[in-house]
Amino acid sequence: MAYCIMKNTLLILAFLLTLSCSFKENKSEKAELLSDLLQSATWVDLTYSFDENSVYWPTNVPYTHDTVFYGINDQGYFYSSFKFSAEEHGGTHFDAPIHFGENQNTIEKVPLKQLKGPGVVVNVSEKAMNNPDYLFTVDDFMVWEEKHGLIPEGAIILVYSGHGKYYYDKEKYLGTNLTGPEAVPELHFPGLSPEAALWLCEERNINAIGLDTPSIDYGQSTDFMAHRILCAHGKTIYENVANLDQLPEEGTFIIALPMKIKGGSGSPLRIVAVI
Ligand SMILES: [Zn+2]
């Protein structure tokens, strides 16, 4: 009897040991696979450098970057340090849901899982390059779905309007060279229609939407409905996204990490695509 119990216990122990070994093997195999995949993937930077040419809203204070120290210090070694100041919403940047959504998440509260997802690149450049006031329609997203299937859960939608190629030419990119309040009525660039914003929020489950213009609402918007709808649904937005012409329509994974500003409504964003 005692022998039997001991034998059974040994068998159970052996079984558990085998289980834990194969679990560990699976775990390390998975880690190796992930590491290989990430190392061999192509990484595309979707971020513009921050500099004196960065695009800010016409009523914003421009970005500044000043030298604190640069050169050989009094101890004989090289040292450099700078300081910068910036409004939250300029250059390649992130809108947290609190931007237009009362009681919605500020940046530091946006969960990490919402800062990444499969990329859905929707090319509307043919229509948007002929019309700077173009509004992306539900149909534009359905055309993508006809080719590639349903927009996946947790997707990051990136709308390629083609206007990113004007980023360093403010008159073409924003529609005006003016600054200050008198520039605002002169803004012309494409954006998301309120109908499409609502459809993306209610009919699909996306993590975020980004585009290659200064704002998710088109330049002529006065009520900012696309922002208001997306933010009210807890979605995040990326504006002035670079290099969208380098992405395939599907098969990318997007990682978008904003600066973790406590209480922030937006911030500079480093965004990359892994192909
Ligand atoms: Zn913004």
Image: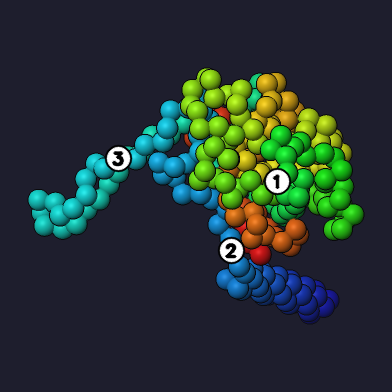
Quadrant (top left/top right/bottom left/bottom right) for the N terminus = bottom right
| Mark earlier in primary sequence (1, 3) | 3
Residue 217 or 111: which is nearer the viewer?
Answer: 217
Query: Which residue is located at x 62 percent, y 69 percent?
Result: 41
Quadrant (top left/top right/bottom left/bottom right) for the C terminus = bottom right
Circles 1 and 3: CB distance less than 8 Å? no
Q: Which residue is mark 1?
A: 129
Give, as a three-letter code, the residue at label 3.
Asp
| Mark earlier in primary sequence (2, 3) | 2
Residue 126 or 210: which is nearer the viewer?
Answer: 126
Q: Which residue is mark 2?
A: 43
Characterize the local packing of mark 3: few (<14), some (14-19) or many (20 or more) Cα atoms within 10 angstroms: few
- Distance from Cα at disc 2 to Cα at disc 3: 30 Å
Query: Which residue is located at x 68 percent, y 31 percent?
Result: 217
Q: How many marks?
A: 3
The reply, left or right, for residue 208 in relation to residue 137 is left
Q: Is residue 57 visible?
A: yes
Give, as a three-letter code, the residue at label 2.
Trp
Residue 102 against residue 20 in the figure, above or below: above
- Distance from Cα at disc 1 to Cα at disc 2: 27 Å
Residue 241, image x and y in percent?
60, 47
Residue 241 or 134: which is nearer the viewer?
Answer: 134
The mark lying in front, picked from 1 and 2, is 1
The reply, left or right, for residue 127 in relation to residue 80 is right
Query: Which residue is located at x 69 percent, y 38 percent?
Result: 132
- Distance from Cα at disc 1 to Cα at disc 3: 37 Å
Label number found at residue 66? 3
